Amino acid sequence: MSFKSIALVAATVAATASTASADSYFQFGERLDSSSVLELGIVRAEAAGTVEIYDFSKGEIGALLGTEMVNAGANADVRVNLGTRATNDVIALLKVDGQTVAQRDFDIDS
């Protein structure tokens, strides 16, 4: 293998490694409208996973209220159906392979 081939392979591996280590996050701020469907906006996931919404009214994770699947990369207009109107603060956990990779707590506007 020539030096150019080795350099090309090394550059490809480095580019792939930086792409695979992309961050996971919730784009929206800290306030959501009181609704039975929470609109989280863009959610970026490092791999396919799940957004889980939990009651957070006492400052600790409570009952699971709803879930939504997300794909790897940026997911636009992520909405989680809770079934009933959210009236208390909530926390969203983004999980990939069962591990929490991002979280954001939200104040619910009444």
Image: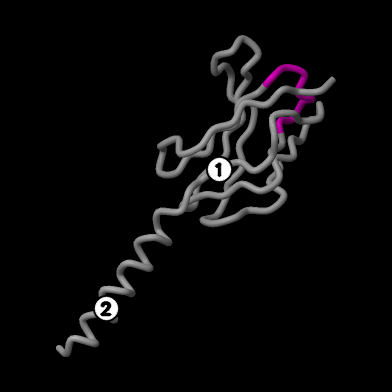
Viewer-nearest residue: 28 or 68:
28
Left or right of residue 11, residue 5 in this image: left
Residue nearer the viewer, 39 or 8:
8
Q: Which residues are magenta?
A: 82-89
In this image, 14 relative to 70: left or right? Answer: left
- The image quarter in which residue 106 lies: top right
Residue at the (29%, 81%) spot, across then down: 8
Residue located at (70% from left, 35% from top): 29
Q: Position of residue 62 (x, y in %)?
A: 57, 16
Circle on res. 25? 1
Determine which residue is flagged by label 2. Answer: 9
Q: Quadrant of the N terminus?
A: bottom left
Q: Quadrant of residue 31?
A: top right
Residue 67 picture location, percent across and down: 61, 37
Name the element at disc 2.
Answer: helix
Q: Judge the density around disc 1: few (<14), some (14-19), many (≥20) Cα neighbours within 10 Å.
A: some
Query: Which residue type carries mark 1?
Result: Tyr
Residue furthest out toward the left? 1
